[in-house]
Amino acid sequence: MKIIMLGAPGAGKGTQAKMIADKYHVPHISTGDIFRANIKNGTELGMEAKKYMDQGLLVPDELTVKILLDRVGKEDCKEGYVLDGFPRTIPQAKVLDEALAELGESIDYAIDVDVPDENIVQRMSGRRACLSCGATYHLEHVPPQKEGVCDKCGNELVLRDDDKADTVLNRLKVYHDQTQPLIQFYETKGVLKTVDGTQAMEDVFQSIIAILEK
Ligand code: AP5
Ligand code: MG
Ligand code: ZN
């Protein structure tokens, strides 16, 4: 089962991708999480990616594509995966398609988690992230048991550098310009499914399960 999560920043791609990955025992692959882990560890890749991420811009395709193709080539991806935050541009989607086609494979579902821009800023300002394990919380919707501490690994929770209001607006603009065209791209391929991302998390998840188990 190869799934792509589409949707604006803060639509809930990561939240849903983790739930899908847990239920179906496939890896959750987030290019954003990979970049943040590299930033935290001070790698060269992290330093390069941070320049773009802090402005709400996309990391160049050359850097991103290589990382993603390496990751999906790993043994644990044989039975499928959930991609969260990749592809984000038409060129990225084409590279992925070509790499899969060489193996005689293709994407099974592209799930668009649809949330209007008005809801996004509120979600992002309340989000708290664990940069160690990638877990995500929300001050109102999903508070951690102990304030500021990750339930899963005990590390500190932070407001992501790119979740400041100005940067969020930039990310939304970049989403509409560069990523939204992917909806049409996957529609044409016949694999696009849309879910209403404004529902409660569990209801969004039930909508996704209904699609996957149809
Ligand atoms: P990335 O990490 O992918 O960020 P994003 O797409 O902007 O998405 P987010 O992680 O912000 O949101 P999400 O949809 O995962 O929402 P979440 O589930 O957390 O990318 C960051 C940056 O890295 C990019 O800007 C770019 O620079 C770079 N990058 C990454 N991939 C790249 C690529 N392929 N090419 C180039 N550059 C790339 O939910 C948000 C909040 O809402 C949470 O607090 C959550 O608890 C809450 N929430 C979720 N669902 C609900 C619900 N149903 N109801 C109420 N609250 C909810
Ligand atoms: Mg995410
Ligand atoms: Zn954690």
Image (cartoon, rainbow, N blue to C red):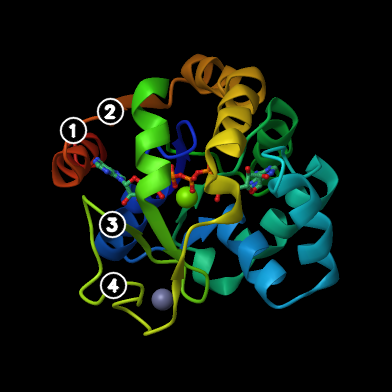
Residue contact at pointers 1 and 2, CB within 8 angstroms = yes
What's the residue at 43%, 40% (across, down)? 10
What's the residue at 67%, 24% (across, down)? 178
Amino acid carrying mark 3 in the image: Met
> From mark 1 to mark 2, how far is it between C-alphas?
9 Å
Label 1: element kind: loop
Query: Would you identify the image quadrant in which residue 90 lies?
Result: top right
Which callout, 1 or 2, points to the residue nearer the camera?
Answer: 1
The vertical placement of 79 against 117, above or below, is below
> From mark 4 to mark 2, how far is it between C-alphas?
31 Å
Mark 4 nearby-residue class (10 Å; few <14, some 14–19, many ≥20): few
The answer to which of marks 1 and 4 sits earlier in the sequence is 4
Q: Which residue is mark 1?
A: 199
Residue contact at pointers 2 and 3, CB within 8 angstroms = no
The circle drawn on residue 19 is 3
Residue contact at pointers 4 and 3, CB within 8 angstroms = no
Which callout, 4 or 2, points to the residue nearer the camera?
Answer: 4
Mark 2 nearby-residue class (10 Å; few <14, some 14–19, many ≥20): some
